[in-house]
Amino acid sequence: MSPSATAAIGSQILTLMAALMLVLQLFIIAQRRLLTNIRLFAIQSLLLAGIAAVVAFHHSASHVYLVAGLTLAGKVVLLPWLLTRLVYRIQIHQEIEPLLNAPSSMLIGGGLTLLGYVVARPFTSMERLGNNTLAIALALVLTGFFLMINRRKALTQVLALLTVENGVMLAAVALTTYGMPLVVELGIFFDVLVAVMVLAILVYRIRENFASMDTSKLNQLKG
Amino acid sequence: MSLLTPILIAPLLAGLLCLVVPSRRAMAALGVLAFATTLALGVALLREVLARGVVTEWNGFLSADALSAWMVLLISVVSFASALYAGRYFQRDIDAGVASPARVREFYVLTPLFGAGMFLVVLANNLGVMWAAVEGTALSSVLLVALYNRRNSLEAAWKYVMLGSVGLALALLGTVFVYAAACKNTPDALPSLNWSYLMSVAGGLDPHLLKLAFVFAFVGYGTKAGLAPMHTWLPDAHSEAPSPTSAMLSGVSLKIAFYALLRFHILTTACLDSPFSRRLLLVFGLLSMLLAPPFILVQRNLKRLLAYSSLEHIGLICTAIGLNTPLTILGALMHMGYHALTKPVLFFAAGNIHQAFHSLEFRRIGSGVVKVLPLTALWMGLAALAAIGLPPFGLFLSELTVLSGGLAAHETTVSALILIALVASFCGILQQLTRILLGARRPDARPIETHRLDGAPAMILLLGALLLFSVWLPTPLLDLLRQAAAIIGGQP
């Protein structure tokens, strides 16, 4: 196969995986069971690792393989495992009613995706691989923020934050040649890891103190 | 001799040692020692920067210019005072059963790490590493805010970490956009995110991408710097954290996030050569300044009042940078320093009052604090006079510098708005604090146990330094400030 044909295939695979990440995001928005949400997030991160691997293969850049490996170890295995353990430990499996019901949430998710495409439009010429990956990345960030506002459980808000982070990493792959420099990738990786641990500690303490992790009960401090 | 590495290592080492050291006294001493070391190294760095301009280490991974050296001094001074104050403060907390020994150890471990994170923010040459370090400071301080494990402190910590993480995710996106601009500039070679490299190619970067990057970085780091309207976490976190941590959050942490924002501002201005970024700084700085006084006037909680005062000061700094004249920028840098010397004293005194009265609510404290805690009331009164900008204290000087710079640049409306905000918060703080500090105790007020001298060393040290530097700015320090101002205002 000619190099341009490999590039075309790589590009298509990348676009497909990015699109699947967005689909999974919409699933997370519609889904209320915490454990399912954690698994959906793990699959989404797996796709991100796959995208990094495709980029690494295409550019034969070894340090991006490392990024793919870190994503795999951290976001696909370690974090979901940690969060799952937390779910069992605090004995809450079901999200209470979100502020908006599933159909209207989906509608808003769709609207935000559209917004992502509009914002990304002037920059599509910069993408090295894949089509519209930047638009999908921005859509992931925006829907992640919506997810955070729409849910009240502390744990779901953590998951929402992680999907936002996936979106940012996708933007990094979409816009730049090889993702971010290695030292930055390492920094981000450890920060995310520590962030989830800190958040888990807080979730646990909130659960102990309030006998709930409903963040709408955190409403004492005003003015 | 290497300077930058030890500045990072000293607090890191102290934090790790605190994990294993058995006695609390030793832990407190380690914290003091670490930040005394960085303060001495900071002074040495000042000389080195004045002599050589830019100091780099580890093949340019770490780098310090005049602006970084100034920030290193601020971090060291505030953290040193905070470590000095923390020993007795937590001893009293433990005696009163408010904090468990394990929690106090958590404080002694996390605080130096928090400091090391801040040092890395200002010393990192790479914008990505700078981002990671800001995130690191956020994470270490979150657990400090939640230290007391009360419902309110958990609520404050949760809001802080959530808003902070959202902000920092946006800031990361801004960093990605800068890197994308660098990639576009050099399609063949692998570019770097190094500050020195980016500044050298700033003219050739894609202006649209940089604009987008600045907007994201502005919202992101602006959240962490407490600029309105992203400031809502600030009063909660500052009021619920233990007082030594509040002092560090308000005294330097806000400015460190603002420093990160400044780097993006300098880069964007160098690239665009337009007032785009400085307009944003001006508008949101003014908004923060004008938003603070109403909240100060209606505030019923001492530390929340101080937090809103910080909002006003960071707003002034941001506005002054936005005005972008040599004089206002110099004023902003001086203001950072004087505010860093003043605000911790207020938080330390508030900590004493909190421990004596078991509350921060004005209603519960009542009036006449001066009758029961005369020295604490004196320190607080002096620092409050400094904070509202009365002479002879330096904040008067820096505020005057900013105002005259604004007027000289014919920015009459902006200067008038600054003046209105300053006067309004002047009245607010004066009225609120005289109500509790002066007057007579109510006859039915509960008697309280007094600790006359507690926290005095740290407070006297800061107030003494404030007075000294208010009347006499040593030439090297002034030179450093001038150089830093030149970096912000474009290379001369």
Image: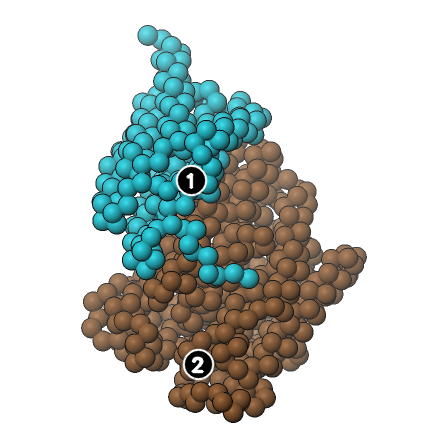
Chain colours: A cyan, B brown
Relative to the observer, which residue lies in front, B205 or B390? B390
Mark on residue B370? none
**What residue did someone put label 2 on?**
B357
* Mark 1: few/some/many CA within 10 Å (<14, 14-19, 20+): some
Front-most of residues B413 and B3: B413
Mark 2–mark 1 Cα distance, whole angstroms, equals 42 Å
Question: Residue B122, percent across and down?
Answer: 46, 56
| Horizontal side, residue B313 vs residue B5: left or right | right
For the point 35% across and 36% down, which residue is it? A32
Q: Residue A102: x, y in percent?
A: 43, 31
Tell me the residue that label 1 is attached to: A98
Amino acid type, callout 1: Pro
Q: Is residue B362 left or right of residue A1?
A: right
Whether callout 2 and callout 1 share a subunit is answered no
Under mark 2, the amino acid is Phe
Q: Is residue B317 above or below residue A36?
A: below
Relative to B444, residue A21 above or below: above
User: Which residue: 41% across, 23% down?
Assistant: A19
In which chain is the residue bearing label 2? B
Residue A130, x across and y down, in percent: 43, 20
Q: Determine the secondary structure under disc 2.
A: helix
User: Quarter holding the N terminus of chain B?
Assistant: bottom left
Answer with left or right where residue B406 lies relative to residue B469: right
Q: Is residue A191 above or below residue A219?
A: above
